[in-house]
Amino acid sequence: MENNFAPLLEMKNIKKNFFGNQVLNDINITLKPGDVLGLCGENGAGKTTLMKILFGMEEIAQTGGFEGEVFIDGEKVEFKTPFDALNAGIGMVHQEFSLIPGFTTTENILLNREPSKRNIISEIFGERLNTLNYNEMTGRAENAIEKMGVKIDPNMVISEMPVGHKQFTEIARELSKDNLKLLILDEPTAVLTESEAKALLESIKNMSNNGVAVIFVTHRLEEIMAVCNKVVVMRDGYVVLDKNANETNIKEITRFMVGRDVKVAESHSELNLDENADIIMSIKRLWVDMPGETVRDVSLDVRKGEILGIGGLAGQGKLGIPNGVMGLYEAGGNVIFNGQPIELNNPRKCLDSKLAFVSEDRRGVGLLLNESLEWNISFPAMQIQDKFLKPLLGGLIKWRDEKAIKEVTDKYIDLLNIKCTSSKQKAKELSGGNQQKICLAKAFALEPDFLFVSEPTRGIDVGAKALVLEAIRQLNKEKGVTVVICSSELEELRGVCDRIAIISGGEVAGILPANESSEEFGQLMVSKVK
């Protein structure tokens, strides 16, 4: 029986050892109905592991379980699987989507909970032959979408949907459940535009008003201050700050997260705007067929040695440009690099020409999740450039140079402050932000002449952001690598780039020096939106 005086959630003295790392130490968290808890911390602080324990994820049991106790409404619970957590009224929206691409929004929202209706055949042969009640399904899906205050087409197929709408579909699936008491949101706004993020924050407030508690895991501290009534900061597996939101501020949260004062990225003071620099890449009339992205007619020149930013609203084409040039999606038009035409729809030709790409889809195309960090960082350079190989029998065969592979991996673990147990650890065992750093290290190891980086700091905490951007800037200055950064974070682009091109409606709306005002860039962003 529920204890009406007990908190909705209590996590007491939670400890977890994970692959030889003590990742959680005596964690205590308490939540009442309607509480919105902002959970912060650098990548590797233990946030995701703590949420996996709460949600009964199988990998916790598979890696030896955990110490401590979890109580829901005063009753001790031991969730063996996420189904146990769901039955207890806990929902979770993960960083990586778990949607079925060929299904519609409605079908994903009500998956395994579809209302059915009887028919002539099921009257005779039993309810297993009932048919789906599509009218009721659509009504329930629309009701869940309405709770978020956003507009999504309930009949759109997931594979054709912009990434922000996929995120809302995940959240709507949880909101459609009648017994929802607590919703865990892991980096929900990382893939959303500013207006979408604003709508989500409003829906979190609505959930709270209706008595649903929310654990909001995010690196966007201003969002925490906007919607949360409690803040918990984790660092190196410990809770280092637990306060009411009205008793703290962004500066204090940041200091506790990283254990030091962090400067927020300021507008770039040393712009490299050499009007006479050679054009290293010239893109003419580029179109790209990439789901969720509009690239219709992009023409853009990139100067040798600069850092060029590409910004714009979600779905307007900024992510489609590098994916099209590098051959990941069908593209047309002309691309000239170093005076030579680049064959489109041929990724190998791009890599052979000393171009490299860090994709925004780190799990889909960025990593060999079951392989070691050494293999992830060295493999592309080994395969494309014969690096990290030593000749045997007079060059008849080539063998992996394990010493060189370990050296290059340790170099980038140190440079990018990648939190891991060793260079032998598997990529899948790292936190999302550290996986992102491995993708960067892999590209750096190719020693390219030209680097595309797409959403380099998505899902990365404030301390690591500065470190990653500084590593990109260092690569540009010390190695002379021309860099193009595509990002949803305008202030991030203004902090590291020389010029910024804004893409709107699938075209270049304008290119400005990075130190132009945010308002100027904002006007360009909405100028050609279709």
Image (cartoon, rainbow, N blue to C red):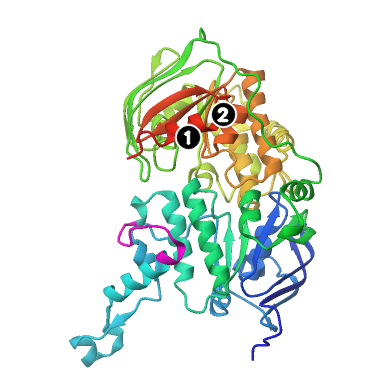
At mark 2, the secondary structure is strand
Residue 292 location in percent, x, y? 37, 45
- The residue lying toward the viewer, choosing from 357 and 87, is 87
> Mark on residue 522?
1
Q: Is residue 425 left or right of residue 205?
A: right
The crowding category of the residue bearing disc 1, from other C-alpha atoms within 10 Å (few below 14, some 14 to 19, many at least 20), is some
Residue 345 in the magenta stretch? The answer is no
On the image, numbered disc 2 is attached to which residue? 397
Q: Is residue 471 left or right of residue 503?
A: right
> Mark on residue 328?
none
Q: How many marks?
A: 2
Residue ID at (42%, 25%): 510
Residue 213 location in percent, x, y? 61, 70
Q: Is residue 400 left or right of residue 282?
A: right
At mark 1, the secondary structure is helix
- The residue lying toward the viewer, choosing from 370 and 93, is 93
Tell me whether circle 2 and circle 1 mark residues in contact (CB < 8 Å): no
